[in-house]
Image (cartoon, rainbow, N blue to C red):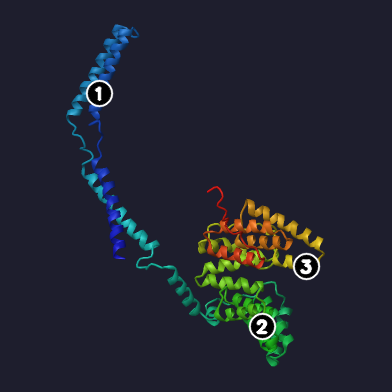
Amino acid sequence: MTLFWIFTALMGLGVAALLALAVLRGQRDTGPSAAFDVQVYRDQLKEIDRDLTRGTIPPEEADRLRTEVSRRILAADAKARGETPGTAARAPGALILSAVVAAVVIGGGYLTYMQLGAPGYPDLPLNTRIEMAAEARENRPSQADAESGLPATAMPDDVPESYQELVVRLRGAVAENPNDLQGQRLLARSEAALGNFSAAWQAQQAIVRIKAAEATARDYADLADMMILAAGGYVSPEAQAALEEALARDPQNGVARYYGGLMMAQTGRPDVAFRMWDRLLAESPDDAPWIPPIRDQIEEMAFRAGVSNFTLPPLGQRGPTQADIDAAGAMSAEERNDMIRGMVAGLSDRLATEGGPPDDWARLINALSVLGDTDQAQAIYREARMVFADLPDGLQTVDAAAAAANIALPAPSTDTQGE
């Protein structure tokens, strides 16, 4: 850190010295201004003589002009004798201005850095940042702590009093019979409708407890959703546990995958968050509820993750998903090929003209394999490896798709003919 301050101080002094030198020198190569005027007037005398020779002015006019210019020469010469080159520049005002310039450059730079910079902040290599993110994830606030720091939720203005009274009675009934599954379901929905997400997730937690081993991925995803809403968008350790239960039962659950990415973003791993959201965006229908928030945030997440070539895909132009391809299995061979070819054509054209994320290339390889177009799939695989040559994660995605489709790059030619 000492080297940093020494280096920046020397840079500041150097810049300030150059600016001060320019102020202190403050003189023209032509000397005093009056001397310059004398030279101009002498040139005018020569011009008058040339005009007289050419006959463009009469002799009387030439004499009058010579007299006027000569008078000006005498006045300028007298003024020049009283000037010393650089006198104005070396006045006390120039010295004061030089000191102000130095103070502004050095002092202003220091104050700006103290406000916008990070004095005393150490270097953060990748391994250190990953360790810090893991520590932040382990030691982040609990659900109760997060909720305690938020203001009380106001009830919506348009809720009828009769509905409020029903909810009050429902709370009493559920309190008397906490193992009533239907009552807990009604209570969770009612509390959520009133914006009372804290009470809603507690009712949803009771649902999970009552159903025990029969609790579904949606039950746990709803629990995490209500907990996160109650915490103002924060994914607590308790919400994370619910998300993990949801994904254990359904690895493709969109709500859990979205919030999982959000949790990684909140705990210093935007790279993981971007990969999770990018894959979810590619595999989800346009009307999925998690698509709008992902589209609103994924470009910023790509920037934070250091992904410079990400382009948000247009809605409705992502090409066939794995679900589309799986659904084609119930069709006849001709129907299946026609459906997949129509979707593949759009995806292939877009990747050729605009490019796209690794998942799009992987889906294209998979779709071409289903169609039996091995040569084209191999060509796309080769192109994808060139596109993502400097992105290990991208290469891993397309390599996995090619391996699943049993597509391999041709071995390098060993033909030595002509050598």
Tags 3 and 2 in contact by the CB under 8 Å rule?
no
Please give left or right for residue 295 compared with residue 82 in the image: right
The count of marks equals: 3
- The quarter holding residue 410 reads bottom right
List the residue tagged with mark 2: 204
Dots 3, 1 in contact, CB < 8 A? no
Label 2 to label 1, Cα distance in Å?
96 Å
Return the x and y of residue 371 as percentages of the image width and height.
74, 61
Which residue is depicted at the point 26% across and 49% down? 17
Q: Is residue 97 visible?
A: no
Out of 405 and 94, give the one closest to the viewer.
405
Left or right, 111 with reference to 311: left
Q: Which residue is mark 1?
A: 39
Q: Quadrant of residue 363?
A: bottom right
Name the spot of residue 277 as percent of width and height, x first: 60, 67
- Residue 329 numbered tag: 3
**Residue 265 appears left or right of 118:** right
Residue 131 percent coordinates (x, y):
45, 74
Which residue is situated farthest in the left direction here?
81
Secondary structure of the residue carrying tag 2 is helix
**Mark 2 or mark 1: whose residue is earlier in sequence:** 1
Mark 1 belongs to which amino acid? Gln
Q: Which percent across, then down, holds residue 172?
A: 69, 89
**Amino acid type, label 2:** Gln
Considering only order in the chain, which callout, 1 or 3, is on the residue closer to the N terminus? 1
Above-or-below relation of 409 to 17 = below
Closer to us: mark 3 or mark 2?
3
